[in-house]
Amino acid sequence: MIRIGNIDIADFPILLAPMEDVSDPPFRHVCKMFGADIMYTEFISSEGLIRDASKSVKKLDFEEFERPIGIQIFGHDIESMIKAAEYAERAQPDIIDINYGCPVKKVASKGAGSGIMNNIPKMVAMTEAVVKAVKLPVTVKTRLGYDENRKDIVEIAERLQDVGIEALTIHGRLRTTRSSVPADWSLIGEVKRNPRMHIPIFGNGDVVDGPQPNISRIRMVLMD
């Protein structure tokens, strides 16, 4: 059994990755029916949350059916991330997740998402600040490193664990590699095998299929 905070999940869980304009409530509902073990919201801008921007606040909505669920936030400013984490916690999710993985230029160029992998000390300091600000378990999603010369995920994983995160999801690509390049799971495995690591490590990238769903169960849920 895998444990994140006080959440127990199966040994080989399926996590729904946060996807902008994709993992909205209807999509999450379907994924839950198909067996997803942990749900995550679309990622939410810390600046948008603390300014009560309607688009950002709306992303906090979820149904009890979706639990356990994490709210994912992103940003480049530590104080804004602290306030956004506290704001998200009031929505009463099960997890607060930090996005250090988004490679989109308009996000990463500001030092948010995977852009923060260019400044590991700030990444660690931001994570520690969020962990201290909330009572819920904090998890992180990130990448293997910033570029080919900085595949720092083994060090990063240890340092994030040391400041209190309770699970880590690693996308098997760099900040500078896009989805046309196959995900590299070898470094994810290296993190997993590191004897210093004791938190759950989840892999992400190029998962395109799985076992056939129980159609009769899905029909029953839909009819309910």
Image (cartoon, rainbow, N blue to C red):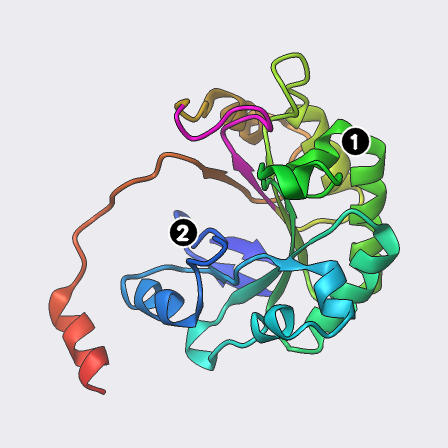
Q: How would you rate the neighbour count of disc 2 (Cα within 10 Å): few for under 14, some for 14-19, many for 20 or more? A: some
- Give 192 or 46, whichever is nearer the viewer: 46
Residue shown at the point (17%, 72%) measured from the top left: 217
Residue shown at the point (48%, 72%) measured from the top left: 67
Q: Residue furthest left?
A: 216
Image-based side of 23 in relation to 136, left or right:
left
Image-based side of 210 in relation to 59, left or right:
left
Look at the image and give the residue range highlighted in magenta. Answer: 168-180
Residue shown at the point (74%, 72%) measured from the top left: 87
Residue 13, disc: 2
In the displayed structure, 64 sits above or below 124; it is: below
Mark 1 sits on what residue? Answer: 120
Residue shown at the point (63%, 68%) measured from the top left: 56
Q: For the residue marked with disc 1, what is the amino acid?
A: Ile
Q: How would you rate the neighbour count of disc 1 (Cα within 10 Å): few for under 14, some for 14-19, many for 20 or more? A: some
Please provide percent x and percent y for residue 101: 60, 40
Name which quarter of the figure residue 70 lies in: bottom right
Whether residue 30 is visible to the viewer of this picture, yes or no, is yes
Name which quarter of the figure residue 118 lies in: top right
Which of the marked residues, 1 or 2, is nearer the chain's N terminus? Answer: 2
